[in-house]
Each structure stands twice: as structure tokens, then as C-alpha cells.
Amino acid sequence: VSMVKTNIVWNPNGTVSYREVRTFHFDREKSAGGQDDIIVSINGPLVGAGALLRVANPALRFVMAVVINKLNEQLIVNHTVGELLYDGYPDFLAAVSHMLDPTIPTSDGKFGYMHGRNATDDGLYTVYTGVHRMDLYNIITHWNGKKNLTAWKGTCNLINGTNGEINPPLKPGQDTLELFSSDICRSFKLVREGINSLYGISAVRFRVDNRTFDNGTTYLPNACFDTKRKMASGAVDVGPCQHNLPAALSFPHFYLADPSYRDKVEGMKPDPDRHGSTLDMEPRLGLSLKINARIQTNFILERDPLIRNLRNIPELTYPILWQDLVSLVPFKVGVAPARMFTRVYAGLHFAAH
């Protein structure tokens, strides 16, 4: 993955604005398979259309249900890795999704979980430079021109912390680190785990814990992430920031999630070393020496009496794929950190049917 900051503007109030373009490159040598490998998985556009129709006006809902049944869209489909990710594949429901919800951007009629997102940025960031106060260094002040999100309720809309690349110097006794990620549409905290060593440098390790995706039952501040779907702890319904589509995020293999998620899906083997997320930070500079960010994308399967192939499906949270993003600073003897580039690697793991 290459990540390049563009449109950089230094503002007079001690902040800087920029966009960060992320470009993913396929590395066959480090991949378990090729982009032409076939994956048997869930029909994303069909599941998404079912959710959109539930809130559409009755006339449109009936007409579209007739069309979908006529097309005999199947719940289980076969596509290549490339099609499911960045290349996309032609799909009627993806082409007409804008008709079902005008807030969905018009597309080229293709569907892929990351189609249209390669070589793009995730929005305009404005952050403190630290010129006036180092304790605010790289803290995000605005994202896309706004100080807060609008998808959630109350304090869950607050944009807090940094993007994780670099942070304010660690304060004495500081045991949490707050980050913001547009990918999961929220801010979240990591908790201090202990001391680690990288390149012979002492680093403080922070790790996500079960509070991140708690539904507010045991960690009350998360109650404002609650939605009409009433998810059990361990997965969060991101429909409010994804056009109300039936998507949920969790840690891979439902790590740290309520057992009810794993009970309904075969093959889940959560492992804290493989599926947890960590950040190793040099405490005086605030530099993130290594980040392991792991997140799983799931579909929330719901029955729909009007769509034949959604009428009798099991209702569960179905894992689609999980991402393993590794960011590290490769220190070299005699080279100043400012002259180095952070290396970022991304691994994508499918949960095939």
C-alpha cells in the first residue's frame, strides 16, 4: 500500500489540512492465491437491496421485489478475488441502487467491496501541527470540514484523537490512546498493555479491548452507537454511515465478541495474536513504530418476505472478509527518522461459504 498526502495547506491557526491517497498493489509473492481464484460468498447487492427496500415507499418496494424475483438473484454467488475487491463485476442491483436511495453515489454498474476506492482518499483532514502546543500534535480538528460526525447520537459523533501515524508525546501515567478512523466511522480508544522493544527502541504498546465494540451494556459511553438492529456486543452496525446498508464491523473471527456471533458461523477461531489490533509508540516523540490494525466486514442477514431468495434465510451476522493492515517504520542505522518512509502492508482474508 502506498499512502501519499496531497493538497497540503498550512493554515494560520497552527493547523494543516491534507488528503491522503491510498493505493493498493497486488503482491502475488506474499499472497496465498491469485486474483483469479474463485470465492463462493454472499450476494452483497441482493442483501443490500433487501435492506434498502424495507425503507422504500411501498410502490417502489413492490415493483423492485418483482424485478429481483424475476432475475432470480441467488444468495450465494461465485466471483473471483479481483471482482470481489477492486475490479468489481457488473450487477443490475448495484446499477440501480441510486434509485433505491438517492444518497448512494451513482456508479458504473459494478459491485466490489473495495471497487472505486483504490487510489482515492478518505476525506479532507485538518490537524494541529503542534507549533503552539505539542500536547495537541496531530490531533484531528476537522474531517471533511466538520468537527463532528452526524451518523450517531450524542458523544459518539465526536472526532477525537489522531489518525494513529504520530501522536502527542505520551503523558506520565497515560493509559489510553484515542484514534479516529473514517473506515469504521468513529473514534475509539486503545489501552496501554506494556512495554515492547522494536529496533532496540523502547516502545509503549497499546491494544484494543472489548470496550471498542461493546454495545453499551458494560461500557456505557458506547450506548450512543446503538441502532434499530440492537446488535450484541462485539460487532457494530455501521448502517448509519453507510446509507443504512446491512453492514457490521467486528474484529476478525468475532474476537472479543459475544459468543452468539460465533455460534451461528462455522470456522471461527479467534486468536488475540492474529486478530487483535495493537500500536507500538515511542513515548517521547509520539511516533508509531508499528501498527497492526485488523477489522472484519460482515453482512447482517435479514429475512424479507417479498424477495423469494431472502424469505427463509437464517438471520445472522455473516463474515465476508477481514483486513490486516500493518504499518511500520523501518529504522536504519545512521538515518534520521524524518528521512524514512512508513511501510504499509495490507492483507485481505475472505470468509468463503
Image: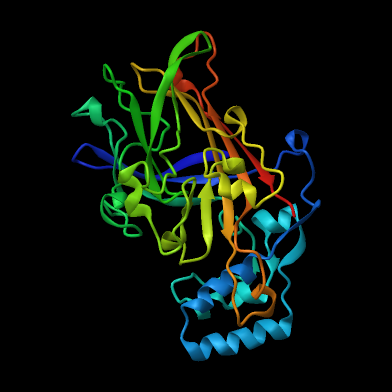
Query: In the picture provided, is 163 more to the left or to the right than 47?
Result: left
Residue 272 image-quadrant placement: top right
| Picture coordinates of residue 145, whole percent (x, y) | 29, 54
How many marks the image carries: the answer is 0
Q: Quadrant of the N terminus?
A: top right
Residue 103 image-quadrant placement: bottom left
Q: Quadrant of the C terminus?
A: bottom right
Residue in front for this viewpoint, 329 or 183: 183
* Colour mapping: rainbow
User: Is residue 204 in view?
Assistant: no
Residue 97 image-quadrant placement: bottom right
- Where 87 sits versus 233, above or below? below
| Picture coordinates of residue 309, whole percent (x, y) | 69, 75
Residue under the point 24% across and 42% down: 11
User: Is residue 280 in view?
Assistant: yes
Query: In the picture provided, is 191 more to the left or to the right than 48?
Result: left
| Picture coordinates of residue 264, whole percent (x, y) | 64, 52
- Where 45 sits versus 67, above or below? above
Residue under the point 36% across and 23% down: 286
| Picture coordinates of residue 183, whole percent (x, y) | 47, 49
Residue under the point 65% across and 55% down: 86
- Where 6 sits versus 206, above or below? below
Residue in front for this viewpoint, 213 or 57: 213
